[in-house]
Image: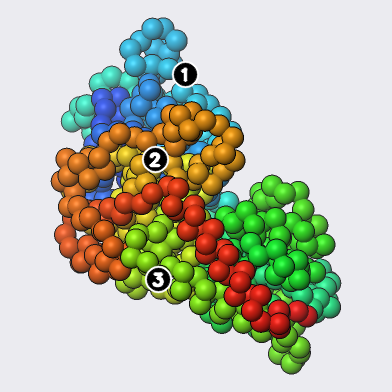
Amino acid sequence: MTRDANTTLAAVLADEWVRAGVTDVAVAPGSRNAPLTLALTAEPRLRLHVRVDERSAGFFALGCARASGRPAVVCCTSGTAAAHLHPAVLEARHGQVPLMVCTADRPPELRDTGAGQTINQVGLYGDAPRWFCDVDAPAQRADAGRWWRALASRAAAAAVGPPAGPVHLNLAFRDPLAPTGRPLLDAPPRAAGEPWTAIVPARRVVDDPTLSRLTAGIAACRRGILVAGWGTEVALPVVERFAARARWPVLADPLSGLRAGPHAVSTYDALLRAPGFAAANRPDLVLRLGAAPTSAAATRWIASAPEQWLVDPDARWLDPSHSVTRRIEADATPLLEGLGHLLGDVPGDTTWPDGWREADRRARRAIDAELDGSEEPFEGRVARDVVAALPPQSSLIVASSMPVRDVESFAGARSGVRVLANRGVNGIDGLVSTTLGVAAVSPGPTVALTGDLSFLHDANGLLGAGGLHATFVVVDNDGGGIFSFLPYAQTVTAEAFETVLATPPGVDVAEVARAHGVSVTEVEKASELGPALDRAVEGPGLQLLRVRTDRATNVARHDAVWSAVADALDEELSAPTA
């Protein structure tokens, strides 16, 4: 009896991915991917999200996976549709996000023959996927069920890692693409809801002699710093115990999730812009978790340390300054736990951490006084006030370019809020779609902080977003504000600067939002932002708060804050020293 091989493969993939923990799939409609799309639609344990634009679908799935930590699936048809997923694939690779990309394709006999909507999709994404498989067109064979379940299980496992990243399945389907109504092939699953191949992850740890040597080096160091960037993947209590026993300050990028607790120095960007403070407090040893901070001042200062140890379990070599002196190929949690245990609770000199805490307090007072001194909206205050106003269990997605830098520079220490960003490749693309993907899987409120260009660049992400609840805080400075901080602003003509760098979009953000059914609120005074955000988070559907700023004024106010912090540090004679 002839059986429906296309539908069997698609149903097996859907079932096996549920067993692997998948809950959300983003689908861009098409004919060639219809066998898989229909199977995903028919699987009641999956949430299906339809996105017309493939680039939006890719970033939507990326947002789901980034927020949940579970693999998310994006499915599209053949041809240029598959090419539109490439930006999300690259971000998943460099941002370590478990994304499963399923591109439909023609069978081998129709490739390179002039068949419509056909390109070479084999290896389409280069070396970005963690694993790639060009899957043969389904056929009726005795062992098909076992092979397809193993395929699905392996794809999910490869996406999760470690390290997590994208997987690409290029799925060929022959006509008839629509379900035939014929019986399916026999493809029984494992019992009790188990995946076809269960994965037992390894615990990457250093041996005892190495741990003892590392501990001795830390114990002998009086001026140490723990730095945490994105991709840290360690819980705050673990970091706090280590910092307390080592008596080290913690410089934590908000994306690390570790910017809280008594050891966190939230004003490090401003402090390290003060030359006197940065020179007087250069550390002897930096222990870095994850990527370097976003702050260029902090990154340069860290690179000047005579010793910089990078915890690098995935051998990613996150060392753009080429200053790391030791790479430790171990998971951060057991490493910090082991170091803290060997360090013990022996009392010691607290001059070094106490000095950093005092400098942090002085800097915070100076920053807040400068930010609160005017009702004219300022991008630094917007970032600070958004982070402070978010309800507990919120997710904040910050756009690359200035928003992620302003959150790092101006936001205070905050617990109970998760800060996310696409910092793998640092692009502004996909911000709206990523935010909506985060909103689809997050139990708490979802808020995005973005500039006008990032928002408009992914305005297609608003298509079909009905039923989701998210708030976009858009800093509208009529172009790319970050370029005003770069040398171009002084070295090229004003006309060239505006035309090819700042690039005013000439489009009203509010009108674009309203065209997609988004409620818009204009925030005209700085003090109005917090209450407006409270109302938006409580309101229905998609909300947008627009805060207009001026690019040139924004640069001047940043400079004023850095000067105020430097003056506050100079007022006291007791600069923190060892």
Residue 7: image location, x then y, percent: 28, 33
Residue pictured at 22% horizontal, 55% vertical: 522
Closest to the observer, 433 or 532? 532
Q: Is residue 304 above or below residue 350?
A: above
Q: Residues within 10 Å of mark 2 (few under 14, many from 20)?
A: many
Dot 2 falls on a residue whose secondary structure is loop
- In the rendered image, the vertical position of residue 370 relative to residue 183, given as above or below: below
In x, y percent, where is residue 435?
34, 51
Left-right relation of 316 to 191: right
Quarter occupied by residue 478: top left
Residue 432 horizontal side relative to residue 409, left or right: left
User: Could you tell me which residue is drawn at 39 percent across and 12 percent down?
Assistant: 110
Name the residue at 58% across, 51% down: 163
User: Quarter of the image holding residue 328?
Assistant: bottom right
Quarter of the image containing the N terminus?
top left
Nearer-the-camera pick, 485 or 348: 485
Q: Residue most toward the top?
A: 113
Question: Which residue is the site of mark 1?
Answer: 120
Closer to the chain start, of discs 3 and 2, is 3
Report the side of 337 relative to 408 (left or right).
right
Residue carrying label 2: 479
Local crowd at mark 3 within 10 Å, few (<14), some, or many (≥20)?
A: some
Q: Amino acid at mark 2?
A: Gly
Q: Which residue is mark 3?
A: 372
Query: What secondary structure is marked by label 1?
Result: loop
Between disc 1 and disc 2, whose residue precedes? 1
Is residue 194 among what the camera can see? no
- Looking at this view, is 40 or 563 the one in front? 563
From the image, state whether disc 3 or disc 2 is nearer to you: 3
The nearer-to-camera label among 1 and 3 is: 3
